[in-house]
Amino acid sequence: MTLRGAGFAPGVEVRVAGEPAADVTVVSASEIHVTTPPLYAGPAAITVTAADGAEAELPREMAQRFHHRLPRRRRID
């Protein structure tokens, strides 16, 4: 997932629906890339916490819907 904002720096932590995101990469002061944790389908709050403890949250009502990525089933005839 890509998050865009301002003031991102190394040491930032991202949580999706309260679960820690993996592979948090600060691309620039305005962009972060993260791997979302496994979640059920539906909206999820996104919380970004800076190394100094400052926190910002995108409430679940405004967040993008996340879905499990299930492997495609191939039809065998």
Image (cartoon, rainbow, N blue to C red):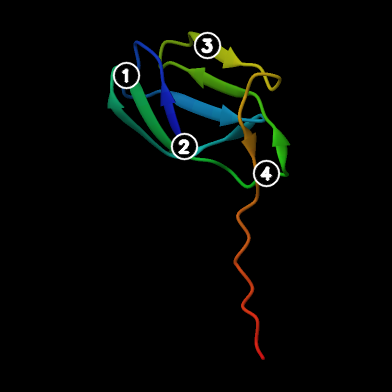
| Residue with the mark numbered 3 | 55
- Mark nearer the N terminus (3 vs 4): 4
**Residue 1 image label:** 2
Q: In terms of depth relative to the viewer, which is nearer, 30 or 56?
A: 30
Q: Nearer the viewer, mark 3 or mark 4?
A: 4
Can you tell which quarter of the image residue 18 is in?
Answer: top right
Q: Is residue 72 left or right of residue 27?
A: right
- Residue 25 locus on image (x, y percent): 34, 34
Residue at the left extreme? 28
Badge number at residue 9: 1
In the image, residue 68 above or below residue 57 = below
Q: CA distance from mark 1 to mark 3?
A: 13 Å
What is the spatial separation of the Cα atoms under label 3 and label 4, in whole angstroms? 22 Å
| Disc number lying in front (2 or 4) | 2
> In percent of the image, x 63 and y 60: which residue is there?
70
N-terminal label among 2 and 4: 2
Which tag, 2 or 3, sits closer to the chain's start? 2
Which circle marks residue 39 in the picture? 4
Comparing marks 2 and 3, which lies closer to the viewer? Answer: 2
Name the residue type under label 4: Leu
Residue 42 position in % (x across, y down): 73, 36
* Residue plotted at (47% across, 26% down): 13
Q: Measuring 40% from the left and 15% from the top, which residue is drawn there?
A: 5
The answer to whether the residue labelled 2 contacts the one labelled 3, judged by CB atoms less than 8 Å apart, is no
